[in-house]
Image (tube, helix red, strand yellow):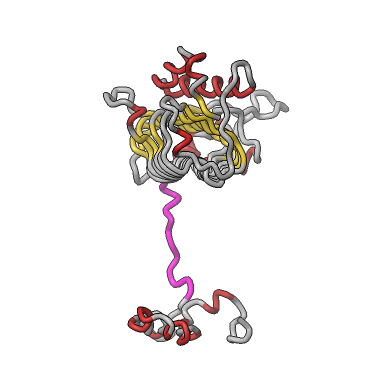
Amino acid sequence: MAEMGFRKVNDMVGHAEMLMPDEEVIRANNKLREIDLSQIITPAKDFGEPGQSMYNTEKQDHALDITIDQEFIKKSAAALEPKPTFPGQDPVPMAVYIEHTVKNTDRALGTTLSHEVSKRWGENGLPDSTIHLKLDGHAGQSLGAWLAAGVLIELEGDANDYVGKGLSGGKIVVYPPLNSSFKAEENIVVGNVCLYGATGGSAFFRGIAAERFCVRNSGAKVVVEGVGDHGCEYMTGGMAVVLGKTGKNFAAGMSGGVAYIFDEDNTFHTRCNMAQVLLETVDEGSEADVKLRSLIEQHVKYTRSTVGRAILNDWPAARSKFVK
């Protein structure tokens, strides 16, 4: 940078005149000889008004002040900023229940609320489900991203990609409308890359998740009724339970955590990437037996899953079909 006359990275923005084609590389590839790079390496100042700044020319308005989370924060005052019941008594967070209809342009629901939870109550957040958001509709991307402990999002509907991204102790429940006629276990209810980078908390999805489910999960416990390709890729911790089929390349790069697959037709091994994992059975009375059943029971409790209920009703036989 110093050799080019720049003191800061920001000072370099727009100075494309400092770039030049590598003639040796171009000569070595006939296809590159036909590419005209002149527009790319023309300085930004030559395109704009004389004297116009080339860096941070316009402030971006993220419209955070009008998001639904601002309403959630106001309605959660009893949990976020509780007042002592008696003089001298430590304030105790009060339970809050909020209902709201959402649409697919409502993104990152619960994220700004979680910021307020963490700011006031620290890393450990609030007691389990202190703030309960009961939503219905079609949630936009990143529902419950970085959701803090003590916040429960219950969505009757479906959600786009990145549900529970960076989940940080909160709880997310998604199930189709109770009056729907289709089979949840045969339909996608949440999109791609759910639970990416989750560090804690739990999630229960009545239905199928699309591709790259639980990628880089390091601590969350989740239940879903089917996943697309590349499930649990690069997972390092936590627990994933799939009560249905998986796509191909499951567990690629998985170096930690545990996944349980309900393998009714004994074909899961053909879709699992075996480079770093071992496949085991779930033995009766084992720790895995207890943990797996407990998580499925929670799944049925929160989502009314018929698949989960059928498995629990025939547990001895169903357990033998799980692959760990």
Quadrant containing the N terminus is bottom right
**Left or right: where does residue 229 sit relative to residue 290?**
left
User: Residue at 46% of width from left, 44% of height from top?
Assistant: 249
Task: Tell me the quarter of the picture where residue 282 sits.
Answer: top right
* Magenta stretch encompasses residue 34: no
Q: Position of residue 294 (x, y in %)?
A: 56, 20
For the stretch drawn in magenta, what is the main secondary structure? Answer: loop
Q: In the current view of this chain or complex, which residue is farthest to the left?
A: 181
Q: Position of residue 170 (x, y in %)?
A: 55, 35
Do we see residue 46 in this rendering? yes
Foreground residue among 269 and 298? 269
Location of residue 192 by image quarter: top left
Seen from this angle, which residue lies furthest right? 88
Asked if residue 80 shows in the view, the reply is no
Question: Along the horizontal axis of the image, is 264 left or right of 78?
Answer: left
Q: Residue at x 35, y 81 (%)?
A: 35
Task: For the C terminus, give its image quadrant.
Answer: top right
Q: Which residue range is magenta in the image? A: 55-68
Residue located at (39% from left, 34% from top): 208
**The quadrant where residue 130 appears:** top right
Picture coordinates of residue 298 (x, y %)?
51, 22
* Vertical side of 218 occupied by 296: above or below: above
